[in-house]
Image (cartoon, grey):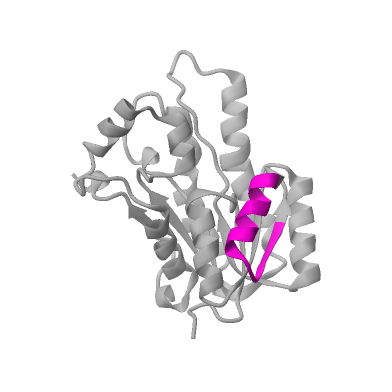
Amino acid sequence: MGKLDGKVAVITGGSTGMALAGADLFVKHGAHVFIQARRKEILDEAAERIGRNVTAVQGDASDLADLDRLYDTVKREKGSIDILWASAGMGEPAVLGEITEEQFERTFSLNVRGTLFTVQKALPLINDNSSIIMTGSNASLGAFPGWSLYAGSKAVQQSWARVWLNELRDRNIRVNVLTPGQVATAKQEELFDEATKAAFESLIPRGRMGSPDEIAAIALFLASADSSYVNGLELVAAGGVTAI
């Protein structure tokens, strides 16, 4: 038996990296997973990789009409949601004094506005005793030069988790934040050159980047009954970076 047998999960940003690894793992544990992402070609490839019990819905998590279309699809095909993982996000370096309005809008539109409305619009479909997960970032816990815009856009999630679990307490809906550190993903390859990656790795007590599969295993814990008494937690998976 799987840990998510018969459950319905929705994962935004689910076409690549940690979220894709999580979607794949959720299906292996018995869930039907809806994945949303902006690029249709990459999304279709993700659905093909997962292979079964997956529905791909192209869309932008910061676009409210696209979120409506996602949840209309979920309602039509499955009727309700047991696990919501708001994982769509983006980050780009932006040094204070050089931050542009366009950079602010891109970052906060997806990471803040997108996350809030991903959760809010799902509420009519979310079953009691369900699990909501948001993807944070250890950038919000550190002081990495050039990443204040991204860090700020992720820091809101810890406050939201605490307030929302209180607002949803009568429905026993759990709200947690999964905060990864440096993880070896395709997006990271786009952002960091070898020198930058080496500099980040030098900060990690484990001596290496994390893998998407390691983060997926933690998401499975937060999605399943294994974490039934875990609520309002920011679970940091950063190889020890934030501990020293």
Tell whether position 85 is magenta: no
In the displayed structure image, the side of residue 170 where residue 135 appears, left or right: left
Q: Residue 218, relative to residue 39: is it above or below? A: below
Image: magenta residue range: 41-56
Residue closest to the far bottom? 1
Q: Give the residue drawn at x 78%, y 62%.
A: 73
Question: Looking at the image, which is closer to me, 45 or 164?
Answer: 45
| Quarter placement of the C terminus | top left
Q: Give the residue drawn at x 66%, y 56%.
A: 120
Residue 173 lies, in percent from the top left, at 55, 70
The prevailing secondary structure element of the residues shown in magenta is helix
Q: Is residue 60 visible?
A: no
Question: Looking at the image, which is closer to me, 141 or 208?
Answer: 208
Q: Give the residue drawn at x 49%, y 81%.
A: 2
Q: Is residue 28 visible?
A: yes
Residue 151 lies, in percent from the top left, at 43, 35
In the displayed structure image, the side of residue 165 where residue 146 appears, left or right: left
Tell whether position 53 is magenta: yes
Question: Looking at the image, which is closer to me, 16 or 113?
Answer: 16
